[in-house]
Amino acid sequence: MIDNKYNLGFFPTPLQELSRLSKKYPDYNIFIKRDDNTGLASGGNKTRKLEYLIKQALDENCDTIITAGAQQSNHCRQTAAACAIAGLKCHLLLGGTKPEVYDGNLLLSSILGAEIHFTAENRKGEDGEKLKNKLENTGSKCFVIPYGGSNFTGAMGFVSAAKELKEQLIEQKLKIDYIFFASSSGGMQAGLTLGKEIYQLDSELIPISIDKEELNGLSLEEVVLNLVEEGTQKLNVNKKFQLSDIKLIRDYDEDGYGVVTANEINAISELARNEGVLLDPVYTARAFYGMLNYLNEKRIPANSNILFWHTGGLPAIFKYAKELK
Ligand SMILES: Cc1ncc(COP(=O)(O)O)c(C=O)c1O
């Protein structure tokens, strides 16, 4: 199952030490996993999910992909790129109304050839089945990818990412104690949770919640648990997960999805000016801020090895030029 994918990216992504930042936080050794370098129209974590999702779409002889997100959705931009590579048509259902000027991810999705539908208050795929029916009435065969690419197939991308990390840790003779990352639609978290179990990854996951809204009436913890339960059956994982096993840090999402505050802006400057690495304003900046806050408040034991999993998203930075200048 792990090999049942369509190659779209550059793997393994680099695992590097952030040596200048580690000096600033002398109690910790800080590392970064560079999924901002996965390729697929400027990188990001969705490349991993799309390798499995696009394979399934091709196996089912579909010719059209439908997916959804916010106007600055990285998932939608990367889906548009994946469709271009695989020769599939791409329809994107994006929240809000058509802006006068396209920028950031929206601009890239359009350049990549996606057909864009603006869906007002719906940004999580509520209109997917309706569009599928309409397109199939005119002869298309559609494959609907859920919001964020977060179903079991998409989560497989992060089961295999756990394997990739485990191999890098063995090769670099390194132990990582804690892994911080942004969690929003749950696929990455579910995949890493399963992969950690399957490949005996000896690190604690610290997912930082980005979006406080529910998804289809479920909390993010419930979404992740459902995906993990499906995965334990399909992958024969011998562990019964409970809701209490699904950790999620809710301390940093109170301003709401896509709202950029001084916290995100400071996190972007801190990593950019110490290490020359750029974060995105919506996901990775919030997660990185959360991680630094944990370290500043010494909520992690001294001498721990910390990994920040950079999940990409750079194009959205241009949408927030006013806040960031
Ligand atoms: C840059 C970035 N980081 C993290 C995430 C969160 O991943 P997931 O949706 O699997 O929780 C996303 C999802 O859109 C993203 O675009």
Image (cartoon, rainbow, N blue to C red):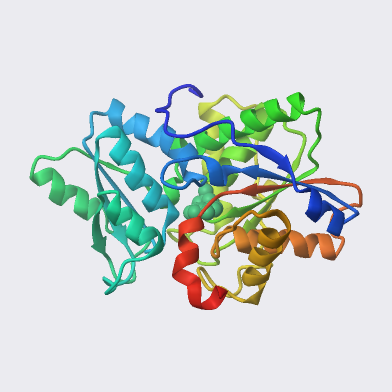
- Percent from the top left, x then y, of residue 277? 63, 54
- Percent from the top left, x then y, of residue 115? 22, 54
- Percent from the top left, x then y, of residue 154? 46, 39
Count of residue discs: 0
Which residue extends farthest left? 138
Relative to the observer, which residue lies in front, 205 or 91?
Answer: 91
Q: Is residue 119 above or below residue 159?
A: below
Quarter residue 296 falls in? bottom right
Q: Residue at x 64, y 37 (%)?
A: 14
- Percent from the top left, x then y, of residue 111? 29, 53
Judged left or right of residue 154, residue 115 is left
Quarter residue 161 falls in? top right
- Residue 223 visible here: no
Relative to the observer, which residue lies in front, 123 or 315?
Answer: 315
- Residue 247 visible here: yes
Q: Residue at x 35, y 30 (%)?
A: 56
Judged left or right of residue 58, residue 139 is left
Q: Quadrant of the C terminus?
A: bottom right
